[in-house]
Amino acid sequence: MTATITHGGSNLLSALRPEDRELLDSHLEACSFDSGHVIYDPGDNVEFCYFPLGSALCSYFVELDCGIAVETVLIGREGALGGVVSAGSLPSYARANVLHGGRFLRLDLRALDRLKRESGAIGNLFARYADCLMAQVFQSIACNAVHTIEHRAAKWLSAAVERTGSHDVTMTQEQLASMMGIGRSYASRVLQRFKRDGLLRTRRGGIEVLDREALVARACTCNEQVSGHFGKVLSGVYPEH
């Protein structure tokens, strides 16, 4: 579905000066996706870069040979999917899913590569974002290796609220368990504990966060580590708490 081109919902694009954003305008296409939509499957040729707007939220999943798909990085209005780190049209390694539906802008990678060469500001923005994206990947690896299921679940739900600006997260217990690479029973026990303590409540197909501050207190500090790095590299782009 097409819509009027606007950068207001993308923190990343809004970091550009107006004259540099204007260089992108004629190449941007507005679209929208529902929750569950697959943007890329592993092996798909990546031809477009996508910018989530507003509350739209996506994630990269790595599919393991045991059939589990584990979430690695959340991407909302602070970022972009596809062609950020590499140059040119290359196959996708991970699956990119829409977790919270909404509006997006997409940009042909051939145009993006040309604009990076023509505009030092655009090239610098994407180079800095690539650094921040890699920081998220590094932090995710460390978090999954060391932190408890409760820490990780609280971190993920806090990050979802932070990115979307909504306390209502479209996510089932089964999906949360799959994303974290754990059994459903483990995810269910953690969510029951959070419900008992008044942090959230569950409904069919979703989780409503009732006390975000208390949830953040139960989480590891990985979100804060990533936010801090964004603040140093791309000030003002990471969503406000």
Image: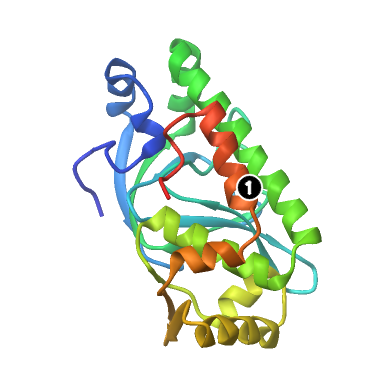
Q: Is residue 199 left or right of residue 13?
A: right
Q: What kind of element bears circle 1?
A: loop
Quadrant of the rendering where the N terminus is positioned: bottom left
Tell me if I can see residue 89 in this picture: no
In front here: 240 or 185? 240
Give the image's coloring scheme: rainbow
Q: Quadrant of residue 190?
A: bottom right
Badge 1: how crowded within 10 Å, few (<14), some, or many (20+)? some
Residue 205, placed above or below residue 135: below
Q: Position of residue 34 (x, y in %)?
A: 36, 65
Q: Quadrant of residue 35?
A: bottom left
Q: Position of residue 106 (x, y in %)?
A: 38, 41
**Image point 42% across, 45% down: which residue?**
239
Q: Which residue is mark 1?
A: 92
Q: Position of residue 150 (x, y in %)?
A: 66, 72
Q: Is residue 178 left or right of residue 236?
A: right
**Image point 28% across, 15% down: which residue?**
19
Report the amino acid beneath label 1. Answer: Ser
